[in-house]
Amino acid sequence: MRARRGPRPERDPADERRKIEARTLDQWIDEGSVRGEATAAARRAGEPARPRRSRGTPAPIDESVKRQIADVVGGRRAERLTVLLCEASDALARERFAEARRISRSVLDELSTVSTAHLIAGLSAYRLGKWREAAAELEVADELEHSVEHRPVLADAYRALRRWKKVDEIWAEIRAASPAHEVMAEGRIVAAGAAADRGDLPGAMAIMEPATKVRGRVRDHHLRQWYVLADLHDRAGDPIAAARLFQRVAEHDPEFVDVRARLDALGR
């Protein structure tokens, strides 16, 4: 979870999960797939300035999560486990992934029915490249919460494991759920990356093509998707289509990753 600006009003659980999601959905791990420079694009997009809190101040945990913990263990032990989960959340916010993983794993036996504990453990493992562990923990979090919001991360863990059927299944679930635009965009990027990993560039481009249609204001997730689609066209030997999309990105944000260098390389 991201560093915060000091005490804030309590938030509902869905809001808390969205904030956890937003910090990791943009960190796709590339293994020679379409996400070469697109990995950097995803990493940069949607990354606001992060004011730091005082070191040692744990990130807040939602009141409903505190109640879940109290219902599971009760008394003083609930207070201790809440503090530990806050510390794990804080470590994840500060990108101390090994620490976040260690702390979250230490509470899982006692908090096996608390989705936030599995989510932090899964996201920490994902950021450390521990794909099987990440997939296992995110699957549990998903079963407990019945939410699609962290499924793009789960799909990318399966992509890294080359479990293509699981990636396709999760992408179908995301599409059927019609989630927030940012979640849909991340799911689309993962699905396209998986298709490209299998050598199916036309299929990857078909997955990304709906992203070219924008209603309303252009946002970072639009730029991220256009960049990925441009990169696919470039790899497929269509420099004209690639340049057109890179130019579209540059018109909205000329500093978006290396878009100007990509245009220069294409002679634009």
Image (tube, rainbow, N blue to C red):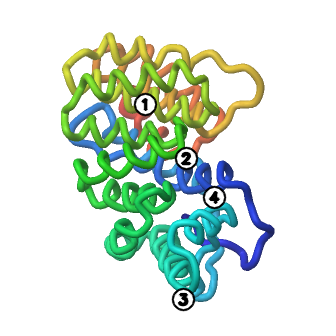
In this view, the residue farthest toward the right is 9
The image position of residue 213, as x and y in percent, is 63, 15
Residue 217 lies, with reference to residue 207, above or below; the image says: below
Q: In which quarter of the image is residue 107?
A: bottom left
Front residue of this view, candidates 127 and 63: 63
SS under mark 1: helix
The x and y percentages for residue 206 are 41, 11
Cβ atoms at labels 3 and 4 below 8 Å apart:
no
Q: Which amino acid does label 4 sit on?
A: Pro
Mark drawn on residue 45: 2
- Say which label, 3 or 4, has the lower sequence index: 4
Amino acid at pointer 3: Gly
Residue 55: where, in percent of width, then height? 55, 88
Residue 195 seen from this side: yes
State the SS at label 3: loop
Residue at x 66%, y 72% (from the top left corner):
4
Q: What is the CA distance from the residue labelled 1 to the residue labelled 2? A: 13 Å
| Among the two numbered marks 1 and 3 on one chain, the one whose residue lies closer to the N terminus | 3
**Where on the picture, by quarter, is residue 100?**
bottom left
Q: Mark 4 points at which residue?
A: 48
Type of residue at label 2? Ala
- Disc number at residue 189? 1
| Contact (Cβ within 8 Å) of mark 1 with mark 3 | no
Distance in Å between CA atoms under marks 4 and 1: 21 Å
Counting other residues with Cα less than 10 Å from the Cα at mark 4, is it few (<14), some (14-19), or many (20 or more)?
A: few
Kind of residue indicated by mark 1? Ile
Name the front one of labels 3 and 2: 3
Label 3 belongs to which residue?
Answer: 56
